[in-house]
Image (cartoon, rainbow, N blue to C red):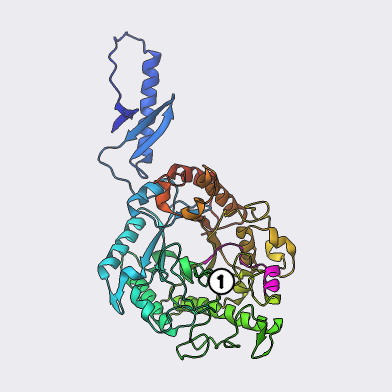
Amino acid sequence: MTIFLDRHPIKKVHSQKRRGFIRPRTLFLSFLLAMLIFISLFLVLSNNQLSFILGGKQIFITLAGTHPASCLPVATKYLFGTLETDPARASQECAAGVRVATQTVGWANYELSDGVFNEAYMDDVKNRIKTDLAAGMKIVISPAIHYPPRWVMNLQGARYINQYGVPAPVSAIDGFEEPNFIFSQTVRDRVARFETRVMQKLAADPDIGLNNIWAVRYVNGPEGETLYPSANDRQGHTNSYWAYDLNAQGQASNRPASIPASPFPGWKPGEKTYAGKPFSPTQVQQWYHWYLSAHTDFVNWHTQLYRDPHEINYQGYLQLLTPGFGTRAFEYTGSLANHLDGSRDPNATMARAAVWYKLFPALKNRTKIVAYVSSMADGSGSPANNGCRGGEYRVDYTADPQVNNWSAVRYISGLADKYGMPKNGENPGSKDLHTRGSQNQGLEVMQASAAQMQSCHFQGMFWAHDENLYDGTIGVTLRDYAKIITQYNIAPAHFM
């Protein structure tokens, strides 16, 4: 063991011995050295270096010839994780209190052409997972169907089309096109093949297995979230509804059997007549119910793909990503009354089917489906980022105006409690944080996210993204995260 003070070796001090007398300074140093040795031996199981401040100076203890070992399995009240976890830092992060790692399987990386898979890439993914497991982490896997190969977009009905005849634009976040998961059975078939193969590969590996996959971040729309594409088609239209491809309009035969064709083919949001006759708000509601239900159909189909014993047969947590509070009841009724012209949809959430208070009760299987708020501490609500106070599940979301002042976390948490779903979430990504003015924006968001997590009784939270704890882009570090983890995990666990 080598002891460093301010990163310089401690120099031996030679002094004259005096019989029967031990200098106070010598006694103090001997006591200090004994304590350092004891502490370092105690911590050898979790890390190979200890640092702390003593007398205004930083002391480092390094155990020569050792390597970071896996964290001991310690029960914690909340599970803190990161997105896109770097396996090389897994031991360091586990020692800091991070307990969940997320690994992504990019569809474009794995299935290079239709039915042709890059197993070398999958081996790399498995090695990353094994490194995380060896460090003591729980694993979340994300089969990223929102990162599609280019060949997918050439499949029948693969592109969403809006009422203006414009295809859905590439994602503003990740630069990928949006496959039509909703109205193309061919696209769904390819999704099923990809995800089934990914999960089977993990299940077949004796060092992984499905029991070691704590959760699956299953994708139900753009950027992984449960949405239609953006309402802004980047061609001058900001109220895009994505139900005008041939399958959706009943002019082709590749639509999933569980979804009927448009009840009013050719009708477009904002139009007050249809086939030469007035188009009533009741008919608008009928059309929108079809549009919303089509998206919900994909979520239910996707859930069944994972749960079916004859398909993937994964029975762990499935994280359902829901950003923001979505469309609230007054916006829903106002939009219908105005024929979906966009005037009562200021956040463009109706067009994207982000009507959470209607989605949650329409889920056919909610067992271990995690209501995952992908926008914790996003500044929503009044006051901003307000947390839960208890009893939110008793509130009538269709009529009680108090929900209009709730943050996204509180709004979705109440719905999750109403329908018996576990809860988790993440902060907005670095691109969103860069739009804010505070120099301490990252730390403020981290603190606010943790406070919301606690007040709403989440399983834990994820920091988006792992690399931002090291690159200095948003002003937070792993040490900041470790302090918050310690603060909220003082009490022992009672779940998970």
Q: In the depicted view, which residue is nearer to us: 160 or 28?
A: 160
Tell whether 35 sits left or right of 236: left
Report the amino acid beneath label 1. Answer: Arg
Q: Position of residue 107 (x, y in %)?
A: 36, 70
Q: Position of residue 435 (x, y in %)?
A: 52, 51
**Location of the N terminus (image quadrant):** top left
Q: Does residue 322 belong to the magenta stretch? A: yes
Q: Position of residue 217 (x, y in %)?
A: 45, 66
Q: Position of residue 213 (x, y in %)?
A: 41, 65
Are there few (<14), some (14-19), or many (20+) residues within 10 Å of tag 1?
Answer: many
Q: Secondary structure at mark 1?
A: loop
Q: In the figure, 96 relative to 281: above or below? A: above
Q: Residue at x 32, y 56 (%)?
A: 131
What's the magenta region?
321-335
Q: In the depicted view, which residue is nearer to us: 194 or 249?
A: 249
Q: Is residue 104 visible?
A: yes
Number of callouts in the render? Answer: 1
| Residue position for label 1 | 352
Q: In the figure, 436 relative to 260: above or below? A: above
Q: In the depicted view, which residue is nearer to us: 406 or 196?
A: 406
Q: Residue at x 65, y 56 (%)?
A: 381
Q: In the depicted view, which residue is nearer to us: 58 or 313?
A: 58
Q: In the figure, 349 relative to 300: above or below? A: above
Q: Residue at x 53, y 86 (%)?
A: 259
Q: Is residue 310 visible?
A: no
Q: Does residue 320 belong to the magenta stretch? A: no
